[in-house]
Image (cartoon, rainbow, N blue to C red):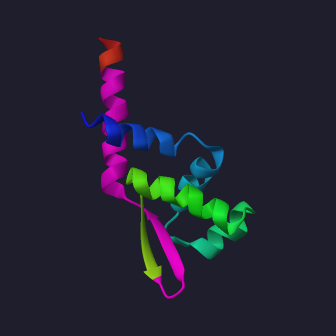
Amino acid sequence: MDYEQTSQIFKAFCDPNRVQIFHILQNGEKCACHLLDMLHIGQSTLSHHMKILCDSGLVSARKDGKWVHYMINQKSLMLAIKLLQGFADKESR
């Protein structure tokens, strides 16, 4: 188990704004400008949250001109699900 990566994944979900961002991204890729409008937070606050989500690997980003578009990284999401399932399986033994 990669404990550093695991801690980054769980850190990503330790803030209500990041959980809300992740929930929004479940509906597909979103531009940072749309996330700002939906969340009613400042650009620097959004950047802070997006850095944590991207560092965890759960969210990927692509630049398009001056804007950044964010989407859920399905491979990392599956890893997070497997990690949680592994904890649950050990608990049920």
Q: Which residue is painted at 30% across and 18% down in the image?
A: 90
* Residue 83 or residue 47, whichever sits in front: 47
The magenta segment: 64-89
Query: Vertically, is 33 above or below 51?
Result: below
Residue that extends furthest to the top in the rendered view of this protein: 93
- The image shows residue 37, relative to residue 93, as above or below, that is below
At 37% from the left edge and 32% from the top edge, which residue is drawn? 84
- Which quadrant holds the N terminus? top left
Across and down, in percent, residue 88 comes to 36, 23
Residue found farthest to the right: 40
Is residue 40 at least partly visible in the picture? yes
Decide: is 85 above or below 61.
above
Observer-nearest of 69 and 26: 69
25 is within the stretch colored magenta: no
Question: What x and y, as percent, mark residue 17?
Answer: 64, 50
Residue 76: image location, x then y, percent: 33, 51
Outermost residue, left side:
1
Judge from the rendering whether residue 41 lies leftward or rightward of residue 75; answer left or right.
Answer: right
Tell me if residue 26 can be seen: no
Residue 69 image position (x, y, % from top left): 50, 74
The C terminus, quarter of image: top left
The question of residue 79 being in magenta is answered with: yes
